[in-house]
Amino acid sequence: MNRKPTIEFHPTIQLFPSLDEEDLKALAENIEEHGLLHPVVLDREGQVIDGRSRLKACEIAGIEASFTTYEGDDPDGYVLSVNIHRRNLTKGQIAMITAKACSLSEQAGRSPGEHSSRSLSERLGISLGTVGKANVVLLHAPDLVDPVISGATSLNEAYTIAQENKAKANSAEAQLARLREEDPELADRVTEGTLTLAGAWAERTERVEEDKRQRRVATRLLDEVVPPLAQARGTRTFSRYDPAFASGTPVTREVIKQAMTALGEMDQVWQERNLP
């Protein structure tokens, strides 16, 4: 038993909207009455690059399709040219298809010169600025690419949303970069997905406030302790110390030793911070 060979379609031809049922039925009836006037076109790899609807209509009509092979070196350009000029598409749809085709061509490693936005826009008769809008949609609102191609959403509507998404992304990137400078640990948690950017900034604010509180407490403590101790230098204060009159923690030789260590540490920190 012979099995029907699997038909594969070129990626670029699949960017174009399919005919609706009514138009496909009409095409099938025409083929049934007059035969297939234009064969389905394949590329050198056997993929359909023109005639997707004709092929489907032949199946509906129960007629075996005929095929021909495109011998040129630019199947992408061929697909775009024959389909765009044959269909009633808006400039926005054409631009979106062109942008997506360029992206597919780049992903497939085909020549960027032949399939750049500029070269295709010139060949297809649309402005480079319109294709530029489509590229913004492709990058920043990919969920709207198919609605634009199908005509459900206009390119301008999608472009407005894409611009908003781009601005939000840029703002988020800037905030994340600033957070990484101020608190790398929180930035890492955002990157890992364990903390939202908003949550990270809220925690950062709490940390800053807690740091201010600790610095305020430490400053008051040192202001109360160190200047009086410095004033006691060269006086008879030390010789008059009497444990019997101590109102707080008694001053022992161990306490004096710890105080000397603390002052040494303080001096080191003051040098590192370049304080007078």
Image (spheres, rainbow, N blue to C red):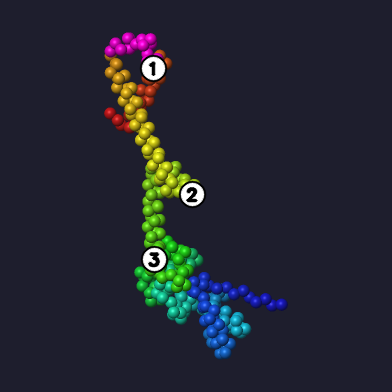
Q: Quadrant of residue 218?
A: top left
User: Circle 2 — which element?
Assistant: loop
Q: Which residues are magenta?
A: 235-250
Distance, label 2 to label 1, CA atoms, is: 51 Å
Identify the residue at the far right of this view.
1
Categorize mark 1 by other alpha carbons within 10 Å: few (<14), some (14-19), many (20+): few
Residue appearing at x 38%, y 39% in the figure: 208
What's the residue type where badge 3 is placed?
A: Tyr
Categorize mark 2 by other alpha carbons within 10 Å: few (<14), some (14-19), many (20+): few
The residue identified by callout 2 is 193
The residue identified by callout 3 is 159
Q: Is residue 58 above or below residue 183?
A: below
The image position of residue 21, as x and y in percent, is: 54, 79
Instruction: Answer left or right for 30 relative to 156.
Output: right
Residue appearing at x 49%, y 49% in the figure: 193
The answer to whether residue 116 is seen in the rendering is no
Point out the frontmost of discs 3 and 1: 1
Instruction: Answer left or right for 200 relative to 71.
Output: left
| Near-viewer residue (98 or 253) | 253
Question: Which mark is first along the chain, 1 or 3?
Answer: 3
Residue 144 included in the magenta stretch of the image: no
The residue identified by callout 1 is 248
Categorize mark 3 by other alpha carbons within 10 Å: few (<14), some (14-19), many (20+): many
Instruction: Answer left or right for 96 relative to 54.
Output: left
The image position of residue 192, as x and y in percent, is: 49, 48
Residue appearing at x 28%, y 14% in the figure: 234
| Near-viewer residue (202 or 267) | 202
What's the residue type where badge 2 is placed?
A: Gly
